[in-house]
Image (cartoon, rainbow, N blue to C red):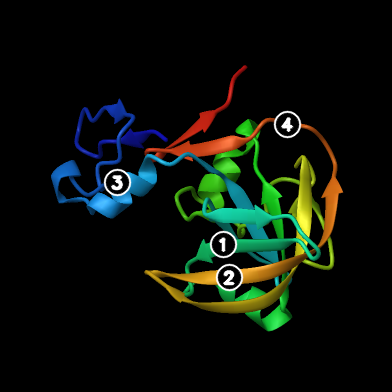
Amino acid sequence: MFHVNPEPGGQIHHTDPFATPAGQRSPVRRFRGRLPAAVTLWTAPGPAGLTVSSTLVADGDPARLLGLIDEDSDLWAAASAAGRFAVTPLGPGHRQLADRFAGLFPAPGGLFAAGAWTETGYGPVPADGAGWAGCRLDDSREYGWGRLVEATVETVEFTGDAGPLVHYRGRYRELTD
């Protein structure tokens, strides 16, 4: 993400001028930043959505999904009211989408105004995504500074085959062969 210095003659740079200085950051947060994480978009009927990089899927009968989300988010309000949500793994072409749903990029007209969306019973999903999972909300609880969400995966659909978008040390990365 690029930031513009608002001072006269300001320069464009690759760092966040509002970020907490390195020496003042939580050691746990810095450790977490060194664990690469897939970037996903969680959406729910309403519609509401949130970029989430703390998602874990466990295969089984039934398959389960766990994630940590912001309990003050519109997504949590919509997902808990509907009892269901969709999870879409994002690809390299979804950087702006990820930033928009993380609240880091402007969303004139609302989060879902840009791009093409496919309506599902679990929430809208990006039409250009590689696939999505429809989840039934089973349980949640406070966990650290977030909300641990537990869900059952009820359906999985594949609509393409794109590489993942990964979050590592505060930036998006792509996997290369």
Q: Earlier in the sequence, mark 1 or mark 2?
A: 1
In the figure, residue 26 lies in which quadrant?
Answer: bottom left
Q: Earlier in the sequence, mark 3 or mark 1?
A: 3
Q: Earlier in the sequence, mark 4 or mark 3?
A: 3
Residue placed furthest toward the bottom = 81
Q: Residue at x 39, y 33 (%)?
A: 2
Which mark lies nearer to you, 4 or 2? 2
Quarter of the image containing the N terminus?
Answer: top left
Numbered circle sitting on residue 149: 2
Quarter of the image containing the C terminus?
Answer: top right
Percent coordinates x, y for residue 136 in the rendering:
75, 72
Of residues 162 and 98, which is closer to you in this image? 162
Q: Is disc 1 in contact with disc 2, using a CB cutoff of under 8 Å?
A: yes
Marks 4 and 3, how far apart at CA: 29 Å
Residue placed furthest toward the left = 23
Compared to 159, does 62 lie above or below?
Answer: below
The residue beneath circle 1 is 67
Q: Residue at x 60, y 45 (%)?
A: 97
